[in-house]
Structure formats: C-alpha cells, structure tokens
Image (spheres, rainbow, N blue to C red):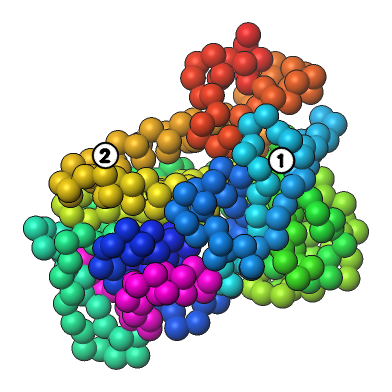
Amino acid sequence: MGGGIAGASLAFRLSVLGARVTVLERENRYRDRVRGELLYPWGVVEAGLLGVADALKPVSKELRNWATKIQPLRAWRSDLTRSATAAGPAVTFAHPVAQEALVQAAAAAGAEVLRGVVVTGVEPGVRPAARVRRAEGKSGIRLEADLVVGADGRGSVTARTAGFSSHSAPETLVLAGALCAGASAPDDTGHVFMRPEAGLLGLVVPLPGGRHRMYAGYHTATGKRNLSGPPALPAFGDVMAGAGMPAEWLDGAELAGPLAEFSGAETWAEPAGDRVALIGDAAAVSDPSWGCGLALALRDARVLADALAGSPDLEAALRRYAGEHAVYHDALRRQTKWLETVFRTPGPQADALRRAAMPKIAVDPSRAPDVVGAGPEGPSDEAARRRFFGED
C-alpha cells in the first residue's frame, strides 16, 4: 500500500528475491508535498543493501559536508566521508523524482504497479485483503494476498482499518518546508541552525538543479505562526534568520513548490500484526526536525525484506521484523528526545540543563548524539545520556 520511497524500495527488493508483488499507488504523477529529501549516510547504506542505490544515483546529489550552528556555540563542520561515525556521504534528491525512479525500478524488477488507485480499507487475517477503487470511481474491488504491507505514510489507512493501535507524543514543534529557487545558500553543504532558548530551528539542504529545500521550525510554547502559503514566505524567512541562518540567503529566492506547515509530533504503532506489516511513516513518524525519516523508512524496508527472506514462516518473520524495529526505533527516539530537550526547548528548566551541557559540548561536539552519521547505532545508553547532559 503506497508506492513512495519506502514502498517502492521494498517492492523492488522482494521482487528481486522472487516474490510476487503488487504495488497500489494513489498518484498517477508524483507531486511535491514538502516531504523529506535528505538521506543520511546510514540511510544510504540501507539503499545499497536494498539494491536501490543505482536507481537513486542518477537523480541524486552527493552531500559530503555538514555544518551545525547551535547558538551561542561556535559552528562545527564535518566531512561525512571522513567522519568516524558516518559510512560516507549523504544524498539529496527531489522527492517526487526519487519516487518515480524507485517505482520504475520496482516495475522493472517484476512488481505489478497499479497507479491511480485508492485503498479504502485493509482486512487482516489468514488471507489479508485490501479494498481498493480507482481514484476517479466509486466502485471497488477486493484483493487478497499472503501479506499486506502498509507504506502509506502518516495517517496510514492500512494501520487504521487493520486495527493497529497508534500512539503519539505531544506536539512541541511545528515545521514548515519550502522548496526555493535562487537562494544564495551554499550548494555543497547541509546546514542546521538552532536557537534553543527561543525554540527556533532552521535546516537548509541543497538539491540537484541548484535548488534548496528549507525547513523552519518553532516550539509550540512560543505561539502559533501559520507558515503556510506563499504570503508566509517573509515570516518563514524570519524564523530561519532567528534560528541563525544568514538572512541574505533568501534574498531574491522564489518558491519552486508549496510552502506548508506541518506537525512535528512523533507517532508510532506496532509495526506488524495479523499478516499485515507497516513500514516508514505508517509504522513510526520520527521527530522530523532531526531529518531521520527517509533513512528509517529504508531501514524498515530492508529489515522486513531480510526477515521475510530468512524464514518460510510468515508469522515468525513478522515477529523478527517487529523486534528489530523496536530496537532501532527506540534507540533513535532516545537520542532525538535528548537533543530536543537541550537544543530545541525554551524555558528555565531547559536553560538549567543547557548550563551544564553546553560548555562541555562546545569543547567536544562528539558528546551530542550523531543522528546524521551514526543514526540508531550511535550510543544511547545511560552513559551516553550522562555524557551528553554534562553529568559525567
């Protein structure tokens, strides 16, 4: 269910392994919907393990350099190809272009791709089924399978109609994303800016073709800003500049896609049930301010494919997937929660934590969890927590 980056990658891998796969995709033509376009180095590794790296390469831009500026600390930069924790460069791409490349690769590998169809419900069971209809029609059909995989994103129809229980964290951050042409931001470096005491965040990522994807974030404790629609571009720029981005980067820039605000709240569900599994945002929406969503989606697809290939017992394979998913999802969630507390939360309690943590991080930035290079494999035990918060 869903021919996006997660669903198409899984369809490709399972088709290569010899499974008969059908992809149900709502859109006949993928559109920009302010989705992630940055794949961290540990996600690039997952793309290689899935076998989809070759499909992504022609539409991607390699990103070696990463810069972080957290006020009032000095900025620090890293070459991801020389990092002790990163496996190599990150890559960026236009999300709709990457979707098309991956779904075409899945079709070439043997998957049946049905586009312009709407999934109206999923029935779990010994022979799970999906109820679907054409996007322009009202009558539908029922498709049975050995396994149904929901790769249909946040608010997954698969999860909701198949009876998965969902959970969500309180909303503390609102993000707005914009695709900009003509920005003067560097074309060879990803930048993140944070002003913790004000709860402001800015992220600037160069894309192929000289464009930039930019994200502005603000803490809900500072009030609602409504950064959606072209008229909100000046206010969007104010948040970016407040977070620390040089304001002149947006001089002369124009929107090349929608400017839209969305919730930064985490959501998650049990990733496997009665012959139904969830991957990507359908399984868990990681705090998007840390940019791990695409890498997590490919991790899900790879782990599920490996589990299915490694056991003839479908239920055992789904239990293995659910167990592994819990380990890496929980590890990453611990790290991003620490980062949120110190780098993104305003207020006197967080100020006190910063007074203990920030001077030590200024001397040794490796104290902060490296979600860019190491991802969930980075240390997230009690010793790592104490080191980050300056309690050691």
| Residue hosting label 2 | 320
| Res. 13 image quadrant | bottom left
Q: Is residue 284 magenta?
A: no
Q: Residues within 10 Å of mark 1 (few under 14, many from 20)?
A: many
Q: What is the magenta range? A: 99-122
Q: Residue at x 26, y 50 (%)?
A: 308
Looking at the rendered structure, the secondary structure element under dot 1 is loop
Amino acid type shown at disc 1? Leu
Q: Position of residue 56 (x, y in %)?
A: 57, 63
Q: Residue at x 34, y 37 (%)?
A: 324
Q: Is residue 34 left or right of residue 116?
A: right
Residue nearer the viewer, 63 or 297 = 63
As measured in the structure, the alpha-carbon distance from the residue carrying label 1 to the one carrying label 2 is 32 Å
| Res. 178 image quadrant | bottom right
Q: Is residue 26 left or right of residue 157?
A: right
- Is residue 269 visible to us here? no
| Residue hosting label 1 | 80
